Amino acid sequence: MIVKVLLIAAITLLFISFINNHSTAKIRASKKIAIGLLSIFAVVTVLLPSATNYIAHCLGVGRGADLLLYAVTVSFFAFVLNQYLRSKQDEQRLVKLARKVALLEADLRSKKK
């Protein structure tokens, strides 16, 4: 019972800190909704572990633990893909910025002559 209370408290605190963090203000609503649904799912699995077995059997998966593993695997790949795409966008922005700086410096040098 103590473990369930600690897990639910941890999930709740993590979700609240995510929502209240000022740097997450620019995160898309769809991602916030996904985090919220994931948090709700996590709390339900802590409170009702037998529910994961029921859902797993309805989906044709052997055990609830396997279903959770599959869900974590998909979530991990989504996270990795999101980070990769974000780094590519940042790289493109950095290249554009470097080009603008180079052009501005060249323009300043030509005006000094």
Image (cartoon, rainbow, N blue to C red):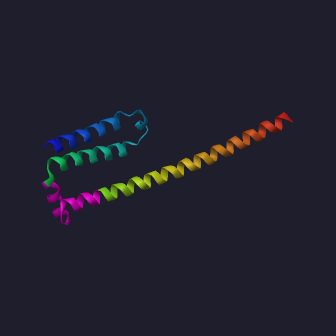
Q: Position of residue 10 (x, y in %)?
A: 26, 40
The prevailing secondary structure element of the residues shown in magenta is helix
- Check if residue 56 falls in the magenta segment: yes
How many numbered discs sit on the rendered protein? 0
In the displayed structure image, the side of residue 99 where residue 74 appears, left or right:
left
Stretch of the chain drawn in magenta? 50-71
Q: Position of residue 27 (x, y in %)?
A: 41, 41
Q: Which residue is drawn at the image coordinates 78% and 39% (left, top)?
A: 107
Is the C terminus in the top left, top right, bottom left or bottom right quadrant?
top right
Q: Nearer the viewer, residue 113 or 69?
A: 69
Q: Which residue is drawn at the image coordinates 73% and 39% (left, top)?
A: 104
Q: Position of residue 98 (x, y in %)?
A: 66, 44
In the displayed structure image, the side of residue 24 where residue 8 appears, left or right:
left
- Check if residue 104 falls in the magenta segment: no
Q: Nearer the viewer, residue 18 or 33?
A: 18
Q: Residue furthest front?
A: 2
Q: Which residue is drawn at the image coordinates 82% and 35% (left, top)?
A: 111
Q: Quadrant of residue 19?
A: top left
Q: Which residue is drawn at the image coordinates 38% and 58% (left, top)?
A: 77
Q: Quadrant of residue 74?
A: bottom left
Q: Is residue 110 above or below residue 92?
A: above
Is the N terminus in the top left, top right, bottom left or bottom right quadrant?
top left
